[in-house]
Image (tube, helix red, strand yellow):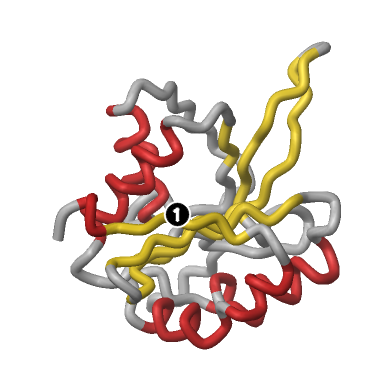
Amino acid sequence: MTRSDFTIHIVDSAGEFAALRSEWSELLASSSSDCLFLTWEWLHTWWRHLGKERRLFIVTVRSASQLIAIAPFTSDRAWIGPLSIPRLEFAGSGTVGSDYLDIIIRRGCESEALQALAEFLADSATSMRLPRVTESGALTVSLATALAGCGWQIVKTAAEVCPFIDLTG
């Protein structure tokens, strides 16, 4: 599968987001990112009730007609001093308490889909803030590495760490 086989589309309307429900659920179940906070039901509900200050910017990647990746982003503007710059963040981020946010990619398609996403995002004039990910195993970490390979500067900070309780023993 080559990157030229991929079609990238931005879902930016509530109607398109709603129409993704069954494909989203199937893809999530077929990915290593499968968790409650990445379900269509969780993120769509978050969007309807808490996401109105942001615009949808859900990036989908298809191979032929099959959905192979979703980057569930929203877009807003960040202020850096007197300047306002476009910024992407995960849908579900903020004060609602979503954890383990990530990109959703079909197993077996990770490297090609990540590279296609990185090449697409590298050309955008935006910044990204992607909190509430796990440092190990998250596809977001691999996306950051791919974006660094495209010339982006990556800054890691320990903030909004996903909580856990160790129940061993």
Q: Say which residue appears at 51% left-offset and 32% top-offset.
A: 124
The image shows residue 159, relative to residue 106, as above or below, that is: above
- Is 113 on the left or on the right of 8, as rendered? left
Q: Residue at x 45, y 39 (%)?
A: 121
Q: Residue at x 81, y 71 (%)?
A: 48
Residue at the spot of label 1: 134
Number of marks in the image?
1
Residue closer to the observer: 57 or 34: 57
Q: Is residue 131 left or right of residue 56?
A: left
**Quarter the C terminus occupies:** bottom left
Tell me the residue at 30%/37% (across/down): 146
**Residue 13 picture location, percent across and down:** 71, 63
Q: Where does the N terminus fall, quadrant-wise?
A: bottom left
Tell me residue 35's x, y (percent): 49, 76
| 157 w.r.t. 21: above or below | above
Q: Amino acid at mark 1?
A: Thr
Which residue is at the far top? 82
Residue 130 in which image quadrant: top right
Foreground of the two, 22 or 32 = 22
